[in-house]
Structures are given as structure tokens and as C-alpha cells.
Image (tube, helix red, strand yellow):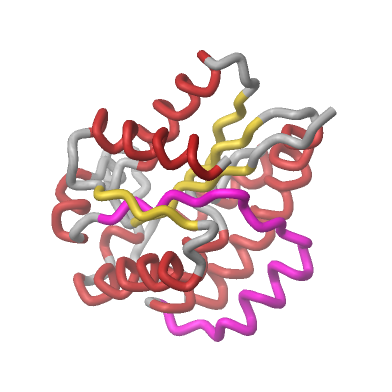
Amino acid sequence: MAQGTFITLEGGEGAGKSTLSRGLADALTAKGRAVVTTREPGGAPGADAIRALLASGEANRWSALEEALLIAAARANHLSQTVRPALEAGSDVICDRYIDSTYAYQVAAGGLSANVLAQLNTLIDAPAPDLTFVLDLDPEAGLGRSRGAVAGEDRFEKKGAGFHAKVRAAFLDIAAREPQRCVVLDASKEAHDVLADALKALESRL
């Protein structure tokens, strides 16, 4: 059986990743493909428990290193319980946040050494995505759209404007460095237009 395609969605707070994930899944399912949608941190029971620790509480509850260690543990659980089994079964996996988010939030904005992140991802044998959509949006607009506070998951939203500006710049830098993997989408557009742009790129890339 052919391996499934691993697609990741990246971007700042309120960029519309969850909405795009649902739209992509519906479109691929309509084409007869099996699709698993998931997210990080989370996506498996152990990883979901860690998500609760990371996403709630005061902004300075954890250092960037502590966040990265928790994320690595959650990612290891997520990969073993959800992502790898789905890909090996031939399903496409659409993941809301992955390695690039850890780089943007913990390294670029949080000050963690990039070497530490690389070592953690090597330790857990984290696979590279086949395709990554970077949803680009002005951080102020994204924070205005975000529903994190409603879900009790607004810890990162509480960080300052400078932090979120660094996150956005980091995502764009990643996309510029890896154009063969990354597609930047204008997330200020209407959701159906963002989906149309993503589907066009998906057809041309894969």
C-alpha cells in the first residue's frame, strides 16, 4: 500500500489553520482519499494531556526550553499513536502545526537554540512533511480573530506584539528557505479563497 501524504498547516494565532484543515479534508475525501486530520500539540491521548499544560495558564509559565521538551514528548506520542499509523495505512494526514511552529515560537521568538530543537526532533525521529501551507496574516488581525480564550487555550496569545511579530517573520523565513516544501497563503482572504489557493497548490505540487 502506498504511503499517505503528510501535509502540515502553519501560521500565527487566528490565521485560519483549523478552517483550512477541514476544507482540505473535505476536498480530498471527495476525491476518494482517506484523510486523517490532527493537530499539535495533541492528536493522541498522551499528547492531548501535554497540550493542556502548554496552552493554558500564564504566559511565562514555561521557558522556551521547557516548552520544547514538553512539545517533543507530545510529538513523540502523536507520531507513534496517530501520524505514522495513518501514513503507513495509506491515509493522508493533515496536521495543524508541526515542527515549523516549534521553530517559530520556541526558537525564533522564544530564544531557544536551533540546535536543541534539531536534536529533539532527531531523537524522536520526526519525519519531514511532504507539503506545508504557511498561512500568513498580520498578527494583530490574527489575535483579533483567534478563539483561544474561548477554549481556555490563550497562553501564547498573552505574549506581546513583539513576540508574535517574530513568529510571523520566522514562518516567512522558513518558507523562503524551503520553497520546494512550503506554500505561503494570504490568510487575510476569505476562507473559501484561501482553500481554493491551497487546493490549486496541492494539485500542482503532489
Q: Residue at x 43, y 65 (%)?
A: 175
- Residue 202 image position (x, y, % from top left): 48, 38
**Above-or-below relation of 103 to 99:** below
Residue 111 part of the magenta-drawn span: yes
Residue 74 part of the magenta-drawn span: no
Viewed as shown, does residue 50 lie left or right of 14? Answer: right
Q: Residue at x 62, y 20 (%)?
A: 33
**Above-or-below relation of 92 to 98:** above
Q: Residue at x 56, y 77 (%)?
A: 65
Q: Where does the magenta region start and end?
A: 110-136
- Residue 28 image position (x, y, % from top left): 53, 23
Of all residues shown, which one is farthest toward the right?
1
Of all residues shown, which one is farthest toward the front?
204
In which image quadrant can residue 45 be found? top right
- Residue 120 image position (x, y, % from top left): 70, 71
**Above-or-below relation of 103 to 42:** below
Q: Residue at x 47, y 57 (%)?
A: 182
Task: Give the quadrant of the N terminus.
Answer: top right
